Amino acid sequence: MASVALSTVVYVHLVRMGASSFAAVQNQTKERISSIYREIKIESVTSTEIFVRNKGPEDIPISRVAVYVDGSLVEVDLAQSSPVLPAGGVGYVKLVDAIAPGEHVIKVTADGAKDVGVFSV
């Protein structure tokens, strides 16, 4: 009788472990598939704002957006930017410091997606 009880406890434990492992794998798979469909495009650039189109199926929080000007990471004013880059829409990123006049290489990254272009300010 004790062996049946012990077998039942072991079985239940293994089933729970398998279910939690399956859920973890399922979440990782969902995240990877979602990242495949992330795509952004720089629509326009001013000296203090960069307008970005989110071509993906999910909103991207502005806190996950990074901006580089001529290879250097620049500071983004999160409070003055769009709260999200809306799925299928355009949001803007407000820069803390203005970009100097002239031609610059602008790169925007967001959750694994990126776009790079040369823009005149």
Image (spheres, helix red, strand yellow):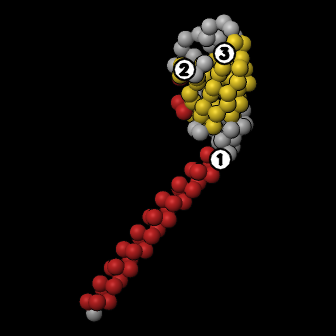
Q: CA distance from mark 2 to mark 3?
A: 11 Å
Residue at the left extreme of this rendering: 2
Disc 1: which residue: 36
First in sequence: mark 2 vs mark 3: 2
Q: Judging from the image, what secondary structure is the residue with disc 3 in? A: strand
| Residue 76 appears anywhere in the view | no
Disc 2: which residue: 72
User: Residue 4: x percent and y percent?
Assistant: 32, 89
Check the image and report above or below for 118 versus 99.
Answer: below
Picture quadrant of residue 14: bottom left
Residue at the top extreme of this rendering: 101
Residue at the bottom extreme of this rendering: 1
Q: Are marks 2 and 3 in contact (CB under 8 Å)?
A: no
User: Residue 59: x percent and y percent?
Assistant: 63, 38
Mark seen at residue 104? 3
Estimate how packed mark 3 is, as few (under 14), some (14 to 19) or many (20 or more) residues with alpha carbons within 10 Å: some
Answer with left or right where residue 87 lies relative to residue 18: right
Answer with left or right where residue 109 lies relative to residue 40: left
Q: Amino acid at mark 2?
A: Ser
Q: Are marks 1 and 2 in contact (CB under 8 Å)?
A: no
